């Protein structure tokens, strides 16, 4: 089947022909005729990269009256990158349609400029939920004439806590509108939206619900927490032609991993919500142009990345939600190509691989982290192949060759080759000469051992003096009370991670940690006390708000003597919940009401890795600095 057989108008077919599009993808072939036939609601389930934008965009353009200067369709997407991508695609599809006007609305840009776009007579609005709600409240956009509402990447919008915004937006549209919902997965929350806002919708599923692209090879590597970065470098070093995405869990970790890769000579850059829109656009342009080899990104920032040739998706750590793995892996193997998706897991996270396999209906292959010797071999033979295929420019070097030949006249061919290879490769060999095995053994409990010192001491097991009187701080430290403990899923590693991430201090500034069922104590340096209190106050962990304060003189001792009963620290001892805490993305990313999703791999998130601060820069295992690769 071709696009011309689907019943699309001539102006759209002309644009598709100029783009080189001839045959529709499976989701397009099924959805477009159904949406063109009549006024129907529709649920479309298909993986990222299967052409969902055209599946709803082309029939939407067919149904718009472009002579009217009112908003007739609204498309809602979770992030500004995806919002901009959809809008650009619409503009490309409609470039031969007279009077076509598409407005793009997202946070981080001038709201006045976006309002002017709408007032100029936009028939279609493509928007992120947060900014669109803001504009509706200010009466800068009206949806009285909306006939079609599209929810793209609906599962991701709900994961990000946009349910209330979606409800608010759809409530401003006419009740007789059509709702088209497109998603890669179909969690319960998406089903609820289809029941609340759709009337007997058509359901189109391409590839099965929540399944993964069959062209993706799924792999996992078992490593300790502190070896993640070293394992990442080896994967990059042995896959010489990698054009990949590295997914991290937090903005801070994303920046740190990218910074360390750049310091170690890799062609990498970060993409996260703390970057300005201009910075994000520049990074994405570099990645699309392939002047950037490795993009390190958060889940949110990576939404909307539309690049066909990504060879590898590397999960630096597990996503918080199983569904997010489907979105991550869907960035590779696009347009019918092959790709690899790999995950680094600790020994105690291995069981989660089975849960992901069940969700995506695909099997993972356990792989070994390459040894230093394997990496050197691969790099060496790549160097030789490059030499073999190097074009000799005799006109430029011809005058120097006689002198060079004279220098080597007493050397055999074998000696010249050996010396050349050594000159080019000795630094790399030296770099990996002390490389240890990074593969964590099945019996390993996942502790972060210090390989160089041989102490094998885990931060969670250091007693910090073994005192029974828990309220006594280490010298020069301030004791901090926290209103959650073991019952909330906390362990000592989680405390370190949270404090480092939100207070932005190195782990060395954290002293003794004592965990009880309902509360905890930890020490921090005096100079960082206020920074810690301000940084983590109100942070949410497992749907519970964190409350911290300086510990009273006898809190710790009295708690211990009562066998770990509730602290008398006032209101800070109570559990609190709710609240709508926003972060990042120019107002388009939320966590909180409707978005506080518990880790679905199991109860709590106590085995999440800590922030990579300090560990990723320690360069253990003898790998102190990677020499820049030669092309």
Image (spheres, rainbow, N blue to C red):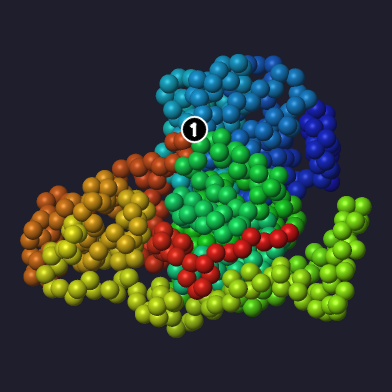
Q: Residue at x 39, y 57 (%)?
A: 598
* x, y percent for residue 622: 51, 73
User: Is residue 66 toward the left or the right of residue 519 in the image?
Assistant: right
Foreground of the two, 447 or 187: 447
Q: Residue at x 13, y 61 (%)?
A: 566
User: Is residue 410 toward the left or the right of residue 447 in the image?
Assistant: right
* Above or below 124: residue 586: below
Identify the image quadrant of the C terminus: bottom right
Q: How many marks?
A: 1
Foreground of the two, 357 or 27: 357
Q: Residues within 10 Å of mark 1 (few under 14, many from 20)?
A: many
Query: Does residue 356 show up?
Result: no
The secondary element bearing badge 1 is classed as loop
Q: Residue reaching furthest bottom?
A: 443
Residue 341: quarter of image? bottom right
* x, y percent for residue 389: 85, 63
Foreground of the two, 306 or 621: 621
Query: Does residue 607 show up?
Result: yes
Q: Residue at x 74, y 32 (%)?
A: 93
Q: Residue at x 61, y 35 (%)?
A: 84
* Above or below 485: residue 45: above
Q: Which residue is mark 1?
A: 107
* x, y percent for residue 541: 33, 55
* Above or below 336: residue 348: below
* x, y percent for residue 176: 55, 29
Residue 385: quarter of image? bottom right
């Amino acid at each position: 089947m071709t696009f011309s057989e689907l019943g699309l108008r001539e102006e759209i077919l002309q644009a598709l022909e100029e783009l080189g599009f001839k045959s529709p993808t499976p989701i397009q072939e099924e959805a477009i005729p159904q949406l063109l036939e009549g006024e129907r609601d529709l649920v479309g389930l298909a993986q990222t990269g299967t052409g969902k934008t055209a599946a709803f965009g082309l029939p939407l353009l067919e149904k718009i009256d472009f002579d009217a200067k009112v908003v007739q369709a609204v498309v809602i997407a979770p992030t500004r990158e995806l919002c901009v991508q959809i809008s650009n695609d619409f503009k490309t599809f409609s470039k031969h349609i007279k009077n076509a006007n598409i407005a793009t609305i997202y946070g981080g840009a001038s709201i006045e400029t976006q309002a002017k776009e709408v007032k100029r007579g936009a028939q279609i609005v493509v928007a992120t939920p947060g900014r669109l709600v803001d504009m509706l409240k200010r009466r800068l956009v009206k949806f009285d004439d909306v006939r079609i509402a599209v929810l793209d990447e609906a599962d991701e919008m709900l994961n990000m806590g946009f349910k209330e915004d979606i409800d608010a937006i759809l409530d401003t549209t006419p009740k007789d509108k059509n709702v088209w919902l497109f998603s890669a997965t179909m969690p319960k929350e998406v089903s609820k939206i289809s029941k609340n806002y759709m009337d007997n919708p058509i359901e189109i599923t391409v590839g099965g619900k929540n399944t993964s692209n069959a062209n993706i090879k799924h792999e996992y590597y078992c490593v300790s927490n502190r070896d993640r970065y070293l394992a990442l470098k080896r994967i990059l070093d042995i896959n010489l032609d990698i054009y990949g995405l590295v997914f991290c869990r937090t903005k801070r970790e994303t920046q740190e991993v990218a910074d360390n890769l750049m310091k170690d000579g890799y062609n990498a850059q970060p993409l996260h919500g703390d970057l300005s829109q201009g910075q994000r656009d520049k990074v994405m342009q570099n990645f699309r142009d392939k002047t950037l080899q490795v993009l390190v990104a958060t889940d949110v920032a990576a939404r909307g990345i539309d690049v066909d040739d990504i060879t590898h998706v590397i999960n630096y750590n597990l996503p918080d939600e199983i569904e997010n793995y489907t979105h991550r892996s869907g960035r590779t193997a696009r347009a019918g190509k092959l790709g690899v998706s790999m995950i680094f897991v600790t020994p105690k996270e291995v069981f989660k691989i089975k849960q992901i396999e069940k969700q995506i209906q695909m099997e993972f292959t356990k792989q070994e982290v390459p040894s230093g010797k394997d990496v050197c071999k691969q790099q060496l033979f790549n160097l030789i192949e490059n030499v073999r295929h190097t074009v000799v420019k005799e006109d430029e070097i011809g005058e120097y060759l006689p002198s060079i030949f004279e220098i080597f006249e007493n050397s055999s061919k074998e000696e010249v080759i050996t010396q050349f290879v050594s000159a080019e490769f000795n630094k790399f060999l030296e770099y990996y000469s002390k490389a240890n095995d990074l593969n964590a053994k099945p019996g390993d409990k996942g502790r972060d051992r210090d390989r160089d010192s041989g102490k094998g001491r885990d931060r969670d097991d250091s007693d910090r003096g073994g005192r029974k009187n828990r309220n006594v701080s280490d010298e020069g430290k301030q004791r901090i009370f926290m209103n959650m403990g073991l019952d909330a899923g906390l362990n000592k590693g989680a405390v370190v991670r949270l404090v480092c991430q939100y207070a932005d201090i190195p782990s060395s500034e954290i002293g003794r940690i004592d965990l009880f069922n309902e509360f905890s104590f930890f020490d921090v340096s005096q100079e960082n006390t206020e920074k810690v209190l301000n940084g983590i106050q109100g942070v949410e962990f497992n749907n519970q708000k964190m409350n911290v304060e300086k510990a009273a003189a006898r809190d710790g001792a009295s708690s211990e003597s009562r066998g770990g009963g509730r602290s008398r620290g006032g209101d800070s001892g109570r559990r609190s919940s709710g609240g709508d805490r926003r972060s990042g993305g120019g107002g388009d990313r939320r966590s909180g009401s409707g978005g506080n999703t518990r880790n679905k791999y199991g109860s709590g998130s106590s085995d999440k890795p800590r922030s990579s601060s300090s560990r990723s820069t320690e360069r253990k295992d003898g790998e102190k600095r990677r020499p820049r690769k030669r092309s």
